[in-house]
Image (tube, rainbow, N blue to C red):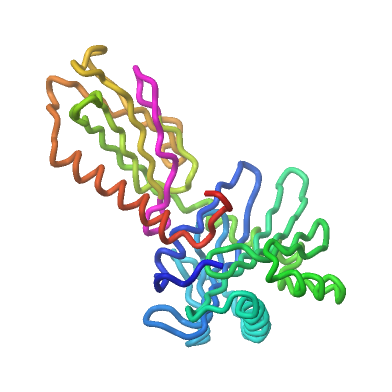
Amino acid sequence: MAPWVRRLSVSFWLLNFSFVTSAGLHRLSFLQLVTSQAAPGLPRRLSVERVNDLVLSVYDSETRQLLPRNGYKQDRQDFWSRCQEWDNWVQTTYQVLTQEVNTSTPQSEPFYMQILKNCELDDATGAVQIVTRYSLNGEDVLRYQSDQNHWFSVHPVARSLAEHWNRTRETFAGLTPQRCKFLIEESREFITGKTAQPKVRVIPVPAAQDQPHRLICHVTDFYPRNIEVTLEWGEQLSSGIRPNGDSTFQIQVSIELGQERAGPTEHVCVVRHSSLGNTPLRVTWVPESQPPNVTGVLVLVVGCILAVMAVGVCSPWRRPGA
């Protein structure tokens, strides 16, 4: 079991819970972070409600208050009042799991536990599936699937707990299919109306040693997540869509220009996004009129490296072998 190497920051914890939501599929998520003791900016219990890519509300166990996020004003007190019941539940679960770990491999480092409840609604069929995951110090230990109505121990430390919950038919999902549909429908209009137009920069990267000249199209500050970015006249490399520190996203696409920048006299970055309607955004780069800006390139590259490091170091859910 991995030790607690550093205090988690709430902003990084929220940043790295990003999900890919397919068209016609909506995801309601409740995330909970449980620690052995409160720390500056990090309460003992923190619960977050998220629909698709947007955080709607946060519950803090220290203040016992529900705080809206991203301008969402809908009253959720009736649902979040159950968080006080969850506090007792997760405290017991936390103690059981940490006791099992310390029995097999004692450690002096404190533990943190994460709980993720995902509820997916398929518009086409109306089908709902709920999955609950438990993690200790970033490592998955326990999972519940509503379609099988069964707890699975992902790690040996959770085997006895999973067997006990299966015998007693304990789910304590706190979330039924009916409730899932209601909460998604309730927030649908608000989420549909939230958009942010992308900002685009096209920047040349000078050749270095054996590396060829490259051209980068950096697109950022857009919402919702789905976007199409194309750099014309070249074979593309993409960073993939990554979350920013707020509710928006960014992506970087690049092509090789060759050592001597041979090829077309201009390159066009084409961006298609729902916030732009039917008119794509086109940004043209002409080599003669825009010589390489080394300072701008270094800032962009260093920023991307730091973002990747943040995701790699701070991401609380890690797939085995990742």
Give the dominant element type of the magenta stretch: helix, strand or loop. loop
Q: Position of residue 216 (x, y in %)?
A: 29, 32
Along the line of sight, the residue nearer the viewer: 148 or 231? 148
User: In the figure, 120 relative to 136: above or below?
Assistant: above
Along the line of sight, the residue nearer the viewer: 313 or 284? 313
Q: Is residue 118 magenta?
A: no
The answer to which image quadrant residue 268 occupies is top left
Q: Position of residue 56 (x, y in %)?
A: 51, 65
Picture residue at 62% right of the left edge, 60% below the top? 28
Picture residue at 35% right of the left edge, 38% below the top? 252
The N terminus is located in which quarter?
A: bottom right
| Span of residues in magenta | 230-248
Side (left or right) of 14 relative to 320: left
Picture residue at 43% right of the left edge, 42% below the top? 275
User: In the figure, 229 relative to 148: above or below?
Assistant: above
User: In the figure, 212 relative to 76: above or below?
Assistant: above
Give the residue at the far front of this rendering.
105
Residue 90 in view here: no
Side (left or right) of 268 relative to 314: left
The answer to which image quadrant residue 200 occupies is top left
Residue 130 in view here: yes
Q: Position of residue 73 (x, y in %)?
A: 50, 70
Along the line of sight, the residue nearer the viewer: 175 or 239? 239
Q: Is residue 238 magenta?
A: yes
Side (left or right) of 232 relative to 259: right
Q: Position of residue 273 (x, y in %)?
A: 44, 37
